[in-house]
Each structure stands twice: as structure tokens, then as C-alpha cells.
Amino acid sequence: MKVGVIDYGMGNLFSVEQALKRLGCDVIVTADVNELDATDALLLPGVGAFPDAMKRLADTNLASYLQKVKAEHRPLLGICLGMQLLFDDSDEVSLTKGLGFFKGSIQRFSGEHEGKQYRVPHMGWNELVVANRPAWLKDEAQAKHVYFVHSFYATGMDANELVAYAEYHGIKVPGIVTNGAITGMQFHPEKSGELGVYLLDQWLKGVAAC
Amino acid sequence: MLTKRIIPCLDVKEGRVVKGVQFVSLRDAGDPVELAKFYDEQGADELVFLDISASHEGRETMVDVVRQTAATLAIPFTVGGGIRTLDDMKRILRAGADKVSINTSAIERPALIKEGSDFFGAQCIVVAIDARYSEEDSTWMVYTHGGRNKTTWQATEWAKEAVRLGAGEILLTSMNQDGEKSGFDLALTKAVRGAVTVPVIASGGAGNAAHFYEVLSEDVDADAALAASIFHYKETSVAQVKEYLRGKGVAVR
């Protein structure tokens, strides 16, 4: 299977590229839409700030390309900031419109719950709890934890689109979201040990099946 | 529930692990990538590589180590040692490290924290603090250059300043406890943890599994604990420490 990792200048793409290669994928890392068109699935990575990322996607015409990807029901996986970009908007730095593939807004963790302060960013291994099992995620995995590192999370989303979440100080932090061929993972599957590898593998198999 | 992290630390010099790691099962115990893989299999939550190379060539070798580690491991890792500029950070992070740790260079030029944080995001920037209790100051003071030079910074104040400038995590080493194997410095860890809102990794003094419990339990509540020699010399293993913590009701992976 050929996977196109969308390179729009945000973050370190080496680890995710290596993880996909270990799972037997052909991987190209590019911003060229013609090259991306010649792949079976697309991966939208991202580390950094939401407004910078949306600006880069717009400046490189990748934002309109991704709208086309959605309209054509091509498989797309957004990771970390790449997942957040799939939502309606974010209030990181200043209110910025996202790609709008999922209903909901990206907000900062408040850092306070029931009068007690908690850590921001949400950093480390947290347990993933499955809410709705999509067709591509059939079996239970042995490992339970994935690696999160983020200060913003998705709010107000459609409950049917939530696949799995992690509990963090009274918040059900969306961890995996799915809507048709579009999937998002807030954690880093490429850094999440056994379960991360399993989830990437399941997603790729789901892509191969459709 | 977010789990507490156990982090082995590897000292790497000119591309080789030093401190005489004793693992008979390993083909090459001096190979950082092989050792990293071993700790990953043991259940380590993250790894820290401390580059103690003195030469330019040694630092270049570290970039190769980082690239190979990133191609092999599926857990996050941090690289510290010899990172003085934004370009140094770029080289290490682009080779596949998840975070860089800065210590002396951050004290000498605090703007480096902000530059790194603005460019890569706070989650990539760990500020390492070496602290020693000073009778004269009646508090913990920050030391640089591997503990040789005392600064005018109080540990809690420097931690706050580092976070204000954009540090995403604090790696706190007690110089009083380091190498003593008599437990982490609980009072220091508690003081710094209370001073900042980002995660704090406690380091220095681990001698057995109970020491990890003390520093990670609710009273002190460090987010992670780091150790080197007790893991390298097989006095205990990451798996044993986690088993002990689980038995005590601490959430671990």
C-alpha cells in the first residue's frame, strides 16, 4: 500500500514515516498534489500552532486539495494537530477556521478541575477507552495506553463520530474520531508502542478493505 | 487516567553508551540503539539520551544515533547535552527525537527556551535543572556545567522562569541525592512541582522500587521518574519497578 504523508512544513515527519514503513507501506513525504493523488491513503501530521498550520495549508493550496479528498471519500488520517485541523475551528492564539470535516471546536485545557489545578500539556501515556467501534477497528488490543502530548483538545463533537477517548481530569478527551473515510488520532500512534502500531495497522487494513 | 512515567537515562559518548552497562543478553551493550530497544521491551515509557561527547565528531555521531533510534523505537525519547542553539535543536529534532533537553545553555541565554518553544512548540523543550541545597541560602540553588558552577537562581524561581519562557517539561536532578541510591529528593521535587504547571521529571537518587513510589505517590506527585545506574546495573528493572508501583495503586502503563 502507498501512503502519502502530507508535508506542509509542520513538525517532524521522520518517525511517522518510519512507523508506516515498518508496517510494510510505501511512503512518500510530499506537498505535491499530483504525487499525493497517486497514493492509496493520506496522512496529515502536524506539530505546532493551529493558525500557522491552516495558513500553510491555504498558502500551498493543500486546504482545497483536502476538501477534494473528502468529497472523493479518499482515506485520510490526521494525527495530533493534524486531527485538530479536521474540526470546525480552534481558539489557539486567535479563533481560526479549520477544515470542517468534523463538527466541534478545539479548545485549550483550562488547567483547573473542581478547584484543583492540573497539568497542561496533557503529556504521557493515557488509557484509551473505546466508545464506538468502527468497521476498521475490529478486535480488542492487549495494550491499553497511547502517548499523548497536547494542550488543546476537541470539544462539542458529534458523539457518533467518537471512536475512543482518554479521561483527563473530568474531561473525556477525544482520542480517535472517524467520519466515513476520514479519521483523526489526537495521540501519536507512531510513538505509542504496541497499541499505536496496532491502531495504525488496523487503519491501514481498513483502507485496504475499501 | 494518565500514568506515571518511568524513564531510563543513557549517557552516550562519541556514539557509545558509557557507564559499563551490564546486560549479557545484548549483542552489543555499548550500542545505544540496541539498549534503547531493550528498555522499550522492558516497558520504559520514554528514554533520555545524554550526549557527553566532547568533540564535534561525537556530536555528529549523536545525530546518527537519534536517526537510528527513531527508525527503530515506537516510544518517545529526549536528547540532551551540548545543545546551545536553535540550529542544534533543529538537527536533533529533525533526526527524529521528540524533545530536546537544555541545561547550562538555558541559564546562560534564557531566550533559547523561547526560541525553541516558539519554533517547535513547548512540548519539545525540556529544561533540565541541577539543584543542590544551600545552607547559606536556606533553599535549593541551580548549578550549571555538570554541577561545577553555582548560579544565583533558586531552583523554584528558575523553574517558573523556564516555564514562562516556554519550557514544556522540567527535568529536575538533585545533586545532593545523585549517585547516593538513598531515594529521590522529595522536598525539592515537591517544591518545584508546586511552583510550575508543566510536568516534572524527578531524577537523582533512585536505589530501589520503593524510591519510585515515594516520589510518584500523591504526596510528592512527580509526573515521571528517571534513573540510570540501577537499571543499567540490573539492580532492578523497569518491569519490576512498574509491578511494584501497580501493587501500590499507582497508575502505570
Image: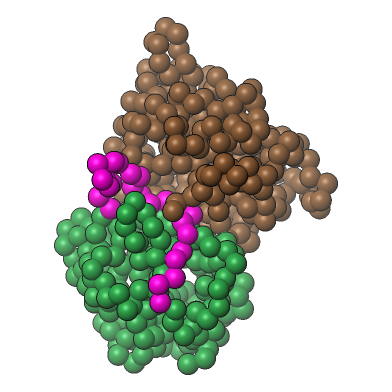
Chain colours: A green, B brown
Q: Quadrant of the N terminus of chain A?
A: bottom right
Q: Residue at x 28, y 79 (%)?
A: A101
Q: Position of residue B88 (x, y in %)?
A: 47, 45
Q: Nearer the viewer, residue B221 or B127?
A: B221
Does residue B210 appear left or right of residue B174 in this picture? right
User: What residue occupies the far left of the structure in this picture?
Assistant: A95
The image shows residue A4, relative to residue A147, as above or below, that is below
- Residue B224, image x and y in percent? 50, 41
Furthest-right residue in this view = B24
**Does residue A113 belong to the magenta stretch?**
yes
Q: Residue at x 39, y 85 (%)?
A: A181
The picture quadrant where one finds residue B41 is: bottom right
Q: Position of residue A23 (x, y in %)?
A: 60, 75
Q: Is residue B82 visible?
A: no
> What is the count of numbered marks?
0
Would residue A143 be seen by someone viewing this image from the given angle? yes
Left or right of B208 on screen, residue B163: left
Instruction: Give me the residue at 34% from left, 61% from top.
Output: A172
Q: Residue at x 64, y 46 (%)?
A: B243
Question: Which corner quadrant of the image does residue B150 belong to?
Answer: top left
Q: Is residue B101 above or below residue A2?
A: above
Most extreme residue toward the top is B136
> Is B14 left or right of A179, judged from the image as shown?
right
Residue B135 is left or right of residue B117, and the answer is right
- Write down the region rendered in magenta: A109-132
In the depicted view, which residue is nearer to us: A69 or B190? B190
In the rendered structure, does residue A107 fall within the stretch colored magenta?
no
Q: Residue B194 in the image: x percent, y percent?
A: 35, 31
